[in-house]
Image (cartoon, rainbow, N blue to C red):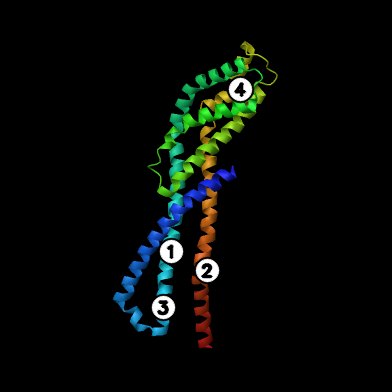
Amino acid sequence: MNTIWRNAFAHATGEFNFMVIVYALLAAVVVLFVMRKTGLMRREAKWHRTLVCVYYLYIPIVFVCAATAWSTVYSAQSGFLSAVDQARPAIATASADYASSVWSSIVSRFRKEPTISLRELGREVAREYSAKLLEGFSDTSRFTLFMKPLVSGLQEGVALSLGAYIEEKLVDTLAGATKVDKELLQRIWKSDLVVLLQGGIVCDILEHQVTQAFKPFYAYLRVMTILFLLPVILETAFSVYRRRKRAA
């Protein structure tokens, strides 16, 4: 599962970093314009101008990058979770309609191959079921550019989670069964899988996968924010120390 998110994250960060760099360059242009208009550069000594320019450019760039990154990731996660929340009624309706056909295919396959691996059967059902439920996520126009690669990771993650759940329930439901009969069918329809196929836990799985998908982004942002702010913190501490030393 972690490999899915690492791959999706690797594809997404390229576009994400490009977007942040564009905002940072725009901030640099604005700061240079303000510095020229206010005469800040002319008031500094020649040997110090470069350092002053870099430092006064660095501060707004850092804050623009940090604000852009955090707000973009947070709004993207909120967009995913909002989409899941809005999809709850549709998923419940669609999965209730779809339950019969899914279970028909399970029964049909089990009747033809009573020795079929429950693991294989669970994965097949999960792929078929999750693909249908996640059709709404194929339209990524509502998501920002850098988040689009995560959609495929989200779909794969949900399919694996559903597969594991369905596999576990199939093992419990079909345990000891050697043929499809009335008793087995009753056992199937009384199982927790019917709740699953009626949308009982699908949205909960979706929300969990969305949270998992965004964890590497938040870890990445925390590290980068600390690294970017470190020069500002050190320079501020050095300035305070220098003033106190002069006062003494």
Tell me the element at label 2.
Answer: helix
Label 1 secondary element? helix
The circle on residue 168 is: none
Residue lying furthest right in this view? Answer: 176
Label 4 belongs to which residue? 191
Please say if 186 is above or below 82.
above
Q: Where is residue 9 in the image (x, y as percent from the top left)?
A: 51, 49
Q: Nearer the viewer, mark 2 or mark 3?
A: 3
Q: Are marks 4 and 1 in contact (CB under 8 Å)?
A: no
Place of residue 129 in the rendered image (x, y in percent of width and height, measured from the top left):
51, 28
Please tell me which residue is depicted at 44% across the width and 33% down the height of the picture.
Answer: 135
Q: For the point 40% across and 41% down, which residue is it?
A: 140
Whether 183 is drawn above or below 84: the answer is above
| Residue corresponding to mark 1 | 63
Q: Give the alpha-carbon distance from disc 2 to disc 3, as whole Å.
A: 20 Å
The residue lying furthest to the top in this view is 182
- Distance in Å between CA atoms under marks 4 and 1: 54 Å
Point out the tag, 3 or 1, that comes first from the N-terminus: 3
Label 4 packing within 10 angstroms: few (<14), some (14-19), many (20+): some
Q: Residues within 10 Å of mark 2 (few under 14, many from 20)?
A: few
Of badges 4 and 2, nearer the viewer stands 2
Q: Given the image, on which type of amino acid does mark 3 rest?
A: Thr
Q: Mark 2 points at which residue?
A: 230
Identify the residue under disc 3. Answer: 50
Secondary structure of the residue carrying tag 3 is: helix
Looking at the image, is mark 2 or mark 3 earlier in the sequence? 3
Indicate the position of residue 88 as horizontal and vertical percent values: 46, 33
Q: What residue type is labelled 1?
A: Phe
**Height in image: 204 above or below 66?**
above
